[in-house]
Image (tube, rainbow, N blue to C red):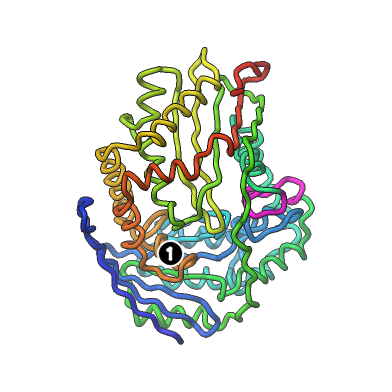
Amino acid sequence: MKIFLYTFLLFFGTMTNSISQLNIPFEKYELANGLQVILHEDHTVPIVSVNIYYHVGGANEKLGRTGFAHLFEHLMFEGSEHVKDGMYDQIVDGSGGQNNGSTGFDATNYWSIVPANYLESVLWLESDRMGFLLPGITQDRLDLQRDVVKNERRQSYENQPYGMSWMKIFESLYPAGVPYNWLPIGSQEDLTAASLDDVKDFFRIYYAPNNASLVIGGDIDVLKTKQLVEKYFGGIAKGKEIQRPNPTNVSIKETKRMVLEDNVQLPRLYMFWLSTSMFGKEDASLSLLSDILTGGKNSRLYKSLVYEKQIAQDVSAFQDGNALSGDFGIIVTAKEGHTLSEMEQAVNEELEKIKSNGIEERELQRSKNSIRANFIYGLQNVGGFGSKTDQMNRYNTFFGNPGRFNEDLQRYETASANDIQNAAKNFLDMNKRVVLSIVPKGKLELQAK
């Protein structure tokens, strides 16, 4: 058993030139089968969080067989060899706890929050679906969950206003066959074509202990928790070595314009650029830029388009850094009587101002404070999305160190106004982007041209 001890500093301070340190103590170790385990004590309230990341997502799939990672997000709750269908929710919900899962491009995450005396029960549930899920996957169960996922795709994308935008954008940002060209939910055709053997083979490769990271946090006794982890996970066989997809080496040579007619009342403009991966050199600068553009009523695009010109209903911007690449997006919904060409021109003007004149120090400080406050707010919770255990697991899965909190925040603290301006110049090329117009049916004249 390999042991790694880390100590961390946590403080709820304001942004200063010398960033206050965050203190979240934890212990990391590794089982003989490769499962990485992180333990964090927090005796504030008598609850525990069990958070597990499998290092597999849409990027690990291939054309013709997409949507498998998300399909397993559903199958993992449907019972395994020793856990009957519905028992997982019965135990967790019956304790008064919560559980959920999520699938992204690069990882799949499952978490539970339960009273501290239910820790052993949850560890048994998690270990059984890691080590003994396959006997529980029958053809009938696969068919049922396949239909559930296909219906989710219809509700979330195909029949959702503006829902097909994301598929069109990522298909345009990334060439066919390259990771991120398809969304983690997969295609209807691939889900239909998936055989029982296809699905089981995918599980054997990616849902092994050596491709997983387990974080247990809250009101725990470390020694007893280690014994429970060994009891329930130690006997699960190690899987084969995983072949990771390579970072995407793609570029956009020119502006790609698309238009979709949809059952919507207001036209919406999407402008996307390829950017940088998570923790990439300019990832934090681009995140700060997105906040300066649309983070609150005093942000540049919101103030200009929504309040002053009153041509937009809403506007948002974001930097989305993933493991292999990243994208920067701006989304604007036009007010009735205005076209998406107006939206595009107004956005372009604001971006050019930043490229030419930079930003003000007060804008930068406001965004730094906002990002830090949101970050700290999430850490008040021991479990759930964005919580302490969730962040630890994300850091560990992608960087091998659960304690990157300070390093993460330091990226924003050290970013200068010059860095923000340079990031805009380097990535937001008006001649190398994806521009998607979604307009009401029969109103193609509203598209951005």
Estimate the x, y position of residue 430 in percent, counting from the top left: 54, 34
Asked whether, in this view, residue 195 is left or right of residue 9, the answer is right
Residue nearest the viewer, comparing 83 with 167: 167
Q: Give the crowd class for mark 1: few <14, some 14-19, many >=20 residues within 10 Å.
A: some
Magenta stretch, overall SS = loop
Q: Residue furthest bottom?
A: 1
Residue, x 56% and y 19% (percent of image)?
A: 265
Q: Which residue is mark 1?
A: 395
Residue, x 55% and y 46% (percent of image)?
A: 274
**Looking at the image, residue 329 lies above or below residue 376:** above
Q: What amino acid type should be assigned to the residue bearing mark 1?
A: Tyr
190 falls in the magenta region: yes
Asked whether, in this view, residue 360 is left or right of residue 252, the answer is left
Estimate the x, y position of residue 392 in percent, counting from the top left: 40, 65
Report whether residue 343 is seen: yes
Residue nearest the viewer, comparing 197 with 404: 404
- Secondary element at tag 1: helix
Residue nearest the viewer, comparing 222 with 240: 240
* Quadrant in the picture for the C terminus: top right
Q: Residue furthest front?
A: 356
Residue, x 71% and y 47% (percent of image)?
A: 187
Report whether residue 43 is seen: no
Estimate the x, y position of residue 120 in percent, counting from the top left: 43, 73
Residue nearest the viewer, comparing 104 with 228: 104
Estimate the x, y position of residue 421 in percent, counting from the top left: 39, 42
In which image quadrant can residue 151 be found?
top right
**Looking at the image, residue 179 lies above or below residue 364:** below
Task: Identify the magenta region.
Answer: 176-191
316 falls in the magenta region: no
In which image quadrant can residue 24 be found?
bottom left
